[in-house]
Image: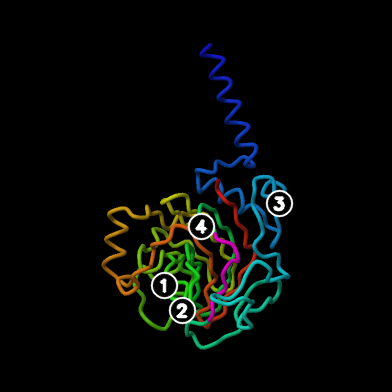
């Protein structure tokens, strides 16, 4: 009987992994490896489609996105060379775009390419409300920046791959300006993992003692609603400098 139960368990696990395209949905690295193997921009491989990945940007349409606190897609963003990018200049915070849909537990994968001194970010768990002017007032950020070309001195939690104003990156696998970087973000309950070019750069547990200490001792003390939402929109940030985004895809973790 024990042998029969063990055999059944092995089969059940195998079927689960097959239904997920061979990747363990509890393992951020496994999911990242699965999606990073697709070298065809703005597309889903057969394995990705089978395991529940969905495109958030197909290279041609802004469908699924709108400006923060807007009903439409803003003209400070455009589609150029099959990428989402900004048209504004000057380095000041401008209008961010956010997903139409709200997400809770998810894995997000995308590619980005920087111009010199570019600054942007992926912000998540965002509340869209006229109480707020920008998504960063409520949502954590996976930092995207050319910190090597930035004109000012930056804190470790401001460089590429950081969880902005919270956690500096544990590794620095970023690629030079003009080359494509692969960004992967996984949020599962209170567990968050940021991966850049295949290396884990940040892992944290939301509401942990460490997280609470960082949240309540730095920049976010001026933003009482920062980090309070466990689900929300996902944003591509417009900081008045040019960044290209492509192959934006998401898998809801249910």
Whether 23 is among the magenta residues is no
Contact (Cβ within 8 Å) of mark 3 with mark 4? no
Q: Secondary structure at mark 4?
A: strand
Task: Report the residue at 73% width, 70% height from top.
Answer: 60
Q: Which mark is residue 45?
A: 3
Query: How many badges with numbers are in the image?
Result: 4
Cα–Cα gap, marks 2 and 3 = 37 Å
Q: What residue occupies the far front of the structure in this picture?
A: 130
Q: Is residue 219 left or right of residue 186?
A: left
Name the front one of labels 4 and 1: 1
Tell me which label, 4 or 2, sits earlier in the chain: 2
What is the magenta range?
A: 95-102
Relative height, residue 232 to residue 240 (above, below): above
Residue placed most toward the observer, 204 or 146: 204
Return the disc, 3 or 4, that comes first in the chain's sequence. Answer: 3
Instruction: Say which label, 2 or 3, has the lower sequence index.
Output: 3
Question: Please, which residue is most extreme toward the bottom here?
Answer: 90
At mark 3, the secondary structure is: loop
Q: Badge 3: few (under 14), some or many (20 or more) residues near its Cα, within 10 Å?
A: some
Give the mark, 4 or 1, whose residue is nearer the N terminus. 1
Q: Are marks 1 and 2 in contact (CB under 8 Å)?
A: yes
The label nearer to you, 2 versus 3, is 2
Q: Please give the name of the residue rendered at 53% of the width and 70% of the height, measured from the top-left corner.
A: 176
Query: Could you tell me which quadrant the C terminus lies in?
Result: top right
């Amino acid at each position: 009987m024990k042998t029969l139960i063990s055999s059944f368990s092995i089969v059940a696990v195998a079927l689960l992994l097959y239904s997920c395209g061979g990747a363990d949905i509890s393992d951020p690295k496994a999911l990242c490896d699965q999606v990073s193997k697709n070298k065809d921009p703005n597309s889903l491989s057969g394995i990705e489609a089978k395991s529940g990945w969905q495109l958030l940007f197909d290279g041609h349409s802004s469908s699924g996105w709108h400006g923060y606190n807007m009903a439409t897609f803003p003209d400070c963003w455009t589609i150029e060379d099959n990428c989402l990018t900004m048209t504004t200049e000057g380095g000041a915070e401008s209008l961010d775009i956010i997903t139409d849909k709200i997400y809770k537990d998810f894995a997000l994968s995308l590619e980005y390419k920087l111009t010199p001194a570019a600054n942007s970010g992926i912000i998540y768990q965002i509340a869209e409300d006229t109480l707020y002017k920008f998504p960063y007032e409520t949502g954590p950020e996976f930092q995207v920046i050319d910190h090597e070309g930035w004109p000012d001195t930056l804190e470790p939690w401001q460089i590429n791959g950081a969880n902005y104003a919270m956690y500096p990156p544990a590794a620095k696998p970023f690629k030079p300006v003009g080359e494509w970087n692969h960004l992967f973000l996984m949020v599962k309950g209170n567990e968050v993992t940021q991966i850049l070019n295949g290396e884990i750069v940040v892992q944290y547990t939301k509401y942990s003692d460490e997280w609470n200490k960082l949240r309540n001792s730095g920049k976010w003390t001026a933003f009482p609603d920062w980090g309070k939402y466990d689900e929300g929109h996902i944003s591509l940030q417009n900081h008045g400098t040019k960044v290209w985004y492509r192959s934006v895809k998401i898998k809801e973790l249910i």
